[in-house]
Amino acid sequence: MMNGNWIPRYSTDNSSLPLKQLKKKFYFSELKKLQLELVKMHEWVRAKDLRVVVIFEGRDAAGKGGVIKRITQRLNPRICRVVALGVPTEREKTQWYFQRYVAHLPAAGEIVLFDRSWYNRAGVERVMGYCTDEEYWDFLRSCPRFEELLIHSGIILIKYWFSVSDEEQENRFRERIEDPLKRWKFSEMDLGSRSSWVEYSRAKDEMFSYTDTKISPWYVVNADDKRRARLNCIHHLLSFIPYEEIRHKKIELPPISKEGYIRPPITEQTFVPGVY
């Protein structure tokens, strides 16, 4: 089972009292411990042929991409992959709504992280008018049954909602606008999410009322503090999947045998210029 000595030392109190910002040194130290456990967990998933789906939803700039990046940073992409679907094609629009998501579900020994998911219909599509009322209500009625089918088929389904305040979202939007390295993250949809803040809040509340079920609950991540949000989410993910460390055999590297090999002249090869 999970080794108890790696558990983070930060407070798990959910009171309204503000917490001090985590020191960068402490944050990276804890993140390294958690990422080591993620490696153990994903090897266990492969060894035991488990199928894991993790959904990341929330407001724009809530930090979903940041935690996904930290989860996958040290993992084998053949075992753990990210699915971030774009706008559906004209053909996909005529399919059963869940169809294009089903195609990305994991096989045995795989973990799939959905950076936004079928819940687009209950969020952006609802607020921005990209679906009809009939399509919207059909989704809310059928989604719990769809997820129940996934779970009964053996898939481990975990759903995270990243919650961010309007003040913090504005700060992150301004940072994206002003930073040339982050400007690409800002889109016209972000402007819509700001002007339609209340509508998105109502859509989220309605979505939770239908899809926050006992068999498939939502887990809310307080995301105003990016560092805490990442550590808390990864810690919870690890606690959700019981795993044991896979013991590997000791590997001895054999010596290199160069017998009979003559390297071609270096002058016959084209090298990248040594600018640095």
Image (tube, rainbow, N blue to C red):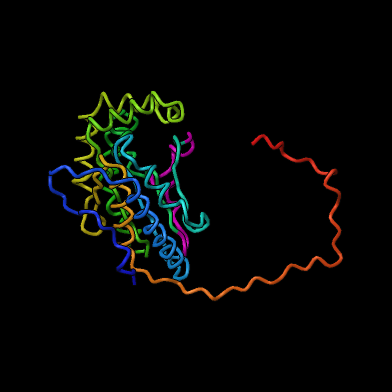
- Indicate left or right for 99 with 13 as reference: right
Task: Name which quarter of the figure residue 196 lies in.
Answer: top left
Of the 4 image quadrants, the one containing the C terminus is top right
**Which x, y percent locates residue 210?**
21, 47
Q: Residue 93 in magenta?
A: yes
Of the 4 image quadrants, the one containing the N terminus is bottom left
Residue drawn at 33 percent across, 61 percent down: 238
How many marks can you see? 0
- Residue 197 or 165: which is nearer the viewer? 165
Please say if 132 is above or below 118: above
| Most distant residue in the left direction | 16
**Which x, y percent locates residue 49?**
45, 68
Task: Name which quarter of the figure residue 235 lies in.
Answer: bottom left
Residue drawn at 25 percent across, 41 percent down: 163
The span shown in magenta is 89-110
- Residue 74 or 30: which is nearer the viewer? 30
- Residue 98 or 254: which is nearer the viewer? 254
Residue drawn at 47 percent across, 61 percent down: 107
Please say if 97 is above or below 234: above
Q: Residue 52 in magenta?
A: no
- Indicate left or right for 36 with 238 as reference: right
Please say if 159 is above or below 126: below
**Which x, y percent locates residue 116?**
37, 42
